[in-house]
Image (cartoon, rainbow, N blue to C red):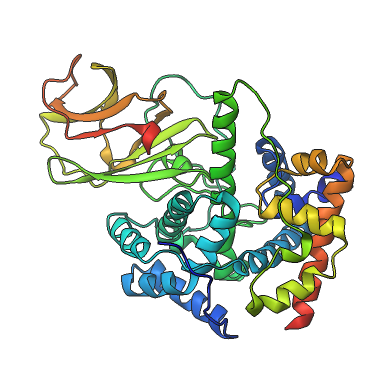
């Protein structure tokens, strides 16, 4: 069965709901966990798909993410950020971990032959969905090098050293572009709210 | 604060540092509240980017997640504590897990939601593996009606077992842990206090880990069928 693009609208109070749901999950409320899944499974699975590509592995990553959320819900400290950020940070870390694990496995299998890196998406196609116009508009405020650096790291799971090699730029350049790009994205998204 | 290190905040927020660099940057964060705030904000921006890639997962996944969560115990909340004591180099044998937990109150407690801390009862070395960023966790039932959770971490090269939910034994018996290579069992130590769990080096690919019930003091070879058998490399 092929997954459909997320069509759920994002409501402004959604984030507060996620915080509240996670608070209940921390107390072992499995109904709240069920509801939390409904709200964040799309973003978690979508991110996993973008990073690991393979749908079956993206499902595995999604399952790992939710089990970690369930297990560690009581350790989430809401004074340190939003529940949704916490969950998406776990999702990204697990997806990147999965993709790096499989890359290093492939490298072992191929006796050190480097993988071909596919330069697959133009910058403007980073966010395809219409409903996330705000994020897309903010991405357009980034320079092309900032955008490429952020995109290759975030959606392809590359390290900044790999991004630098791929874009043939010095390491410090990529390091600062990645940071500047994210800062610009943050400022733009904050301004949009 | 090193300017050079500080500029890694962006790469850190999108997991684009190598393992060693990330470790070094985390140490830097310990002493830099402004950097922690910046990382938090950049992670939030990255999370919005990730959420914009939303795709509904296949319907069957939900049932599988719910079923798995139902089998998995939750970690207790943190009580003021930071695990600032790094374990010395790993020894190849199983370590008794009753190590004292050192409580240190320091600036910037829990700056990261990913910070690892010991449970109230599980040994610090055990929760360290369960809380590792790359931990793979599996819970299996034991043949004597309890359950055991196993965590493996490739970055730590360790595995840990939470034996907290194994049924209590009589004084004449003890749980014993084994590694099984091919069909050769080798003792990996006694679980004298199942409440604190055990941790050990991550066994090589294909090696199984098993738990048996043995007479007090343990056995050289298993004298009963395993109540749990897991292959850590498949977790």
Image quadrant holding the N terminus of chain A, namely: bottom left
The residue lying at 24 percent from left, 47 percent from top is B165
Q: Hey, which quadrant is residue B25 in on the image?
A: top right
Q: Can residue A149 be seen at all in this image of the molecule?
A: yes
Q: Hey, which quadrant is residue A122 in on the image?
A: bottom right
Image coords of residue A143 (percent x, y): 88, 62
Q: Is residue A112 left or right of residue A64?
A: right
Image coords of residue B7 (percent x, y): 83, 50
Q: In terms of depth relative to the viewer, which is nearer, A182 or B78?
A: A182
Q: Is residue A9 left or right of residue A164?
A: left
Q: In terms of depth relative to the viewer, which is nearer, B168 or B205?
A: B205
Q: In terms of depth relative to the viewer, which is nearer, A110 or B89?
A: A110
Image quadrant holding the C terminus of chain A, namely: bottom right
The residue lying at 43 percent from left, 28 percent from top is B202
Image coords of residue A57 (percent x, y): 47, 49
Q: Hey, which quadrant is residue B196 in on the image?
A: top left
Q: Can residue B31 be seen at all in this image of the molecule?
A: no
A93 shown above or below A125? above
Q: Is residue A131 left or right of residue A60?
A: right
Image coords of residue A53 (percent x, y): 56, 51
A183 shown above or below B116? below
Q: How many marks?
A: 0
């Amino acid at each position: 069965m092929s997954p459909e693009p997320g069509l759920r609208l994002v409501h402004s109070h959604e984030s507060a709901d996620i915080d509240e749901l996670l608070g209940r999950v921390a107390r072992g409320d499995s109904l709240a966990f069920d509801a939390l899944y409904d709200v964040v499974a799309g973003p978690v699975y979508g991110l996993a798909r973008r990073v690991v590509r393979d749908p079956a592995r993206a499902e595995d990553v999604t399952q790992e993410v939710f089990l970690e959320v369930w297990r560690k819900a009581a350790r989430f400290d809401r004074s340190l950020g939003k529940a949704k950020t916490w969950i998406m940070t776990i999702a990204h870390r697990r997806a990147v971990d999965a993709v790096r694990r499989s890359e290093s496995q492939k490298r072992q299998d191929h006796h050190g032959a480097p993988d071909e890196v596919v330069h697959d998406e133009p910058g403007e196609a980073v966010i395809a969905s219409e409903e996330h116009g705000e994020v897309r508009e903010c991405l357009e405020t980034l320079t092309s090098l900032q955008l490429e650096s952020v995109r290759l790291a975030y959606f392809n799971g590359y390290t900044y050293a790999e991004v630098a090699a791929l874009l043939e730029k010095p390491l410090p350049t990529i390091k600062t572009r990645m940071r500047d790009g994210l800062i610009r994205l943050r400022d733009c998204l904050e301004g949009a709210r | 604060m090193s300017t050079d290190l500080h500029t890694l905040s962006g790469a850190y927020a999108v997991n684009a540092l190598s393992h060693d660099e990330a470790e070094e940057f985390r140490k830097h964060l310990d002493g830099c509240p402004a950097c922690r705030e910046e990382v938090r904000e950049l992670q939030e921006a990255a999370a919005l980017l990730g959420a914009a890639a939303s795709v509904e997962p296949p319907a069957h996944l939900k049932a599988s997640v719910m079923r798995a969560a139902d089998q998995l115990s939750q970690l207790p909340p943190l009580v003021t504590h930071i695990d600032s004591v790094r374990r010395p180099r790993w020894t190849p044998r199983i370590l008794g897990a009753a190590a004292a937990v050192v409580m240190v109150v320091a600036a910037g407690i829990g700056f990261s939601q990913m910070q690892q801390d010991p449970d109230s009862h599980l040994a610090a070395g055990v929760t360290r593996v369960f809380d590792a960023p790359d931990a793979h966790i599996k819970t299996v039932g034991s043949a004597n009606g309890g359950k055991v959770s196993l965590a493996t971490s490739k970055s730590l090269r360790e595995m840990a077992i939470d034996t907290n939910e194994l049924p209590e034994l009589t004084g004449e018996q003890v749980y014993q842990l084994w590694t099984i290579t091919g069909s050769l069992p080798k003792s990996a130590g006694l679980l004298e206090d199942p409440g604190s769990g055990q941790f050990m080096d991550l066994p090589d690919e294909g090696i199984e880990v098993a738990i048996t019930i043995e007479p007090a003091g343990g056995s050289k070879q298993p004298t009963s069928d395993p109540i749990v058998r897991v292959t850590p490399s498949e977790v």
